[in-house]
Image: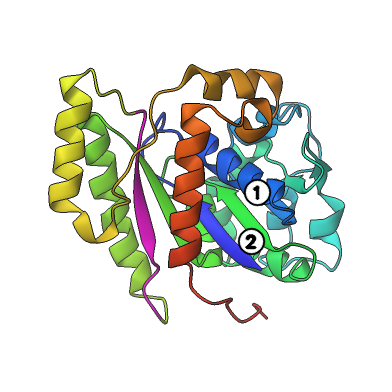
């Protein structure tokens, strides 16, 4: 099982779209995919037609056992999606209280890793959608994954979020046996605007070693696919955004590390 996380410490950069698009393309290839929503806003959960405000069982339940995950709990929380090869570990608004609980109890950093260990033989890929802030949920995503995707909107303010994310990675890597590989993905690119062009130049200048050299263009069909509740490749396989994500997937598969050992 390969575990990828999509994260950035800034909202509105295309994290959920990126996670769903990549998961959909993998699923189209016949891969069994689990998508994990760690954002209290529940964008990915809503994308697939589930209401995070109404769910009584969600990824939040994993954190209610003093850092341990009872056998069978992860599987019991799974929900279906519009794609037959994708299942969802949903979010709920209860996740917003996780920071307060973790401060009181501690030991929450490997909860998701332990949950995924229970599902190790069930899926070939896991794609995690992280919240746009550093906290317990993001720490769990970074601890569980073997490849990190950082979407960065091609605008000036997004560069500040990227700086924070790279700084966070530097801190996380001090506690890992090996550095977490990451790929920066320029998103929402509009070649008609100077902001997009100049931001892309900065990314190529300052982050060359970790940057996917292409970009995800602005494409209204990506938004339309979310309204339809379909992964973008099922909504319109020939859309510009889908073609770009297909190229990104090829790149990520080529960059991926070998499977990690199962988490005990």
Q: Can residue 109 be seen in this snapshot?
A: no
Given residues 120 and 236, the one toward you in this image is: 236
What residue is disc 2 on? 112
For residue 36, which numbered disc appears in the image? Answer: 1
132 relative to 38 in the view: left or right: left
Colour scheme of the picture: rainbow
Q: Secondary structure at mark 1?
A: strand
Q: Secondary structure at mark 2?
A: helix
Percent x, y of residue 256: 48, 67
Q: Are marks 1 and 2 in contact (CB under 8 Å)?
A: yes
- Within-10-Å neighbours for mark 2: few <14, some 14–19, many 20+: many
Residue 57 drawn above or below residue 54: below
Quarter occupied by the C terminus: bottom right
Residue 50 drawn above or below residue 202: above
Residue 149 drawn above or below residue 202: below
Residue range in magenta is: 178-188
71 relative to 199 in the view: left or right: right
Residue 107 drawn above or below residue 87: below
For residue 10, which numbered disc appears in the image? Answer: none
Please report the residue visible at 14 percent of the width from the left and 31 percent of the height from the top: 198
Percent x, y of residue 26: 64, 51
Given residues 212 and 175, the one toward you in this image is: 212
254 relative to 156 in the view: left or right: right
Quarter occupied by the N terminus: bottom right
Which quadrant would residue 185 be assigned to in this image?
top left
Please report the residue visible at 36 percent of the width from the left and 55 percent of the height from the top: 183
Q: Can residue 99 be seen in this snapshot?
A: yes
Which quadrant would residue 45 be assigned to in this image?
top right
Residue 184 inside the magenta-drawn segment: yes
Of the two numbered discs 1 and 2 on the same chain, state the one appearing first in sequence.
1
Given residues 252 and 89, the one toward you in this image is: 252
Percent x, y of residue 69: 75, 66
């Amino acid at each position: 099982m390969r575990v990828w996380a999509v994260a950035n410490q800034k909202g509105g950069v295309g994290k959920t779209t990126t996670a769903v698009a990549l998961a959909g393309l993998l699923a189209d290839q016949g891969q069994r995919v689990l998508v994990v929503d760690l954002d209290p806003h529940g964008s990915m959960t809503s994308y697939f037609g589930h209401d995070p405000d109404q769910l009584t069982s969600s990824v939040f339940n994993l954190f209610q056992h003093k850092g341990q995950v009872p056998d069978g709990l992860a599987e019991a929380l799974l929900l279906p999606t519009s794609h037959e090869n994708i299942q969802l570990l949903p979010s709920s608004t209860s996740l917003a209280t996780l920071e307060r609980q973790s401060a009181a109890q501690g030991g929450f950093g490997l909860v998701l890793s332990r949950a995924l260990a229970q599902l190790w033989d069930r899926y070939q890929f896991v794609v995690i959608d992280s919240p746009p802030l550093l906290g317990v949920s993001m720490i769990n995503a970074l601890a569980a994954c073997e490849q990190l995707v950082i979407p960065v909107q091609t605008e000036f303010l997004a560069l500040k979020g990227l700086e924070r994310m790279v700084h966070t990675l530097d801190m996380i890597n001090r506690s890992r046996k090996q550095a977490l590989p990451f790929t920066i993905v320029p998103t929402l690119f509009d070649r008609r605007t100077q902001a997009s062009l100049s931001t892309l130049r900065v990314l190529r200048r300052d982050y060359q070693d970790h940057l996917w050299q292409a970009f995800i263009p602005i494409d209204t069909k990506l938004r339309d696919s979310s309204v339809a509740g379909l992964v973008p490749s099922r909504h319109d396989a020939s859309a510009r955004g889908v073609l770009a994500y297909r190229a990104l997937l090829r790149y990520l598969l080529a960059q991926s590390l070998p499977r990690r050992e199962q988490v005990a």
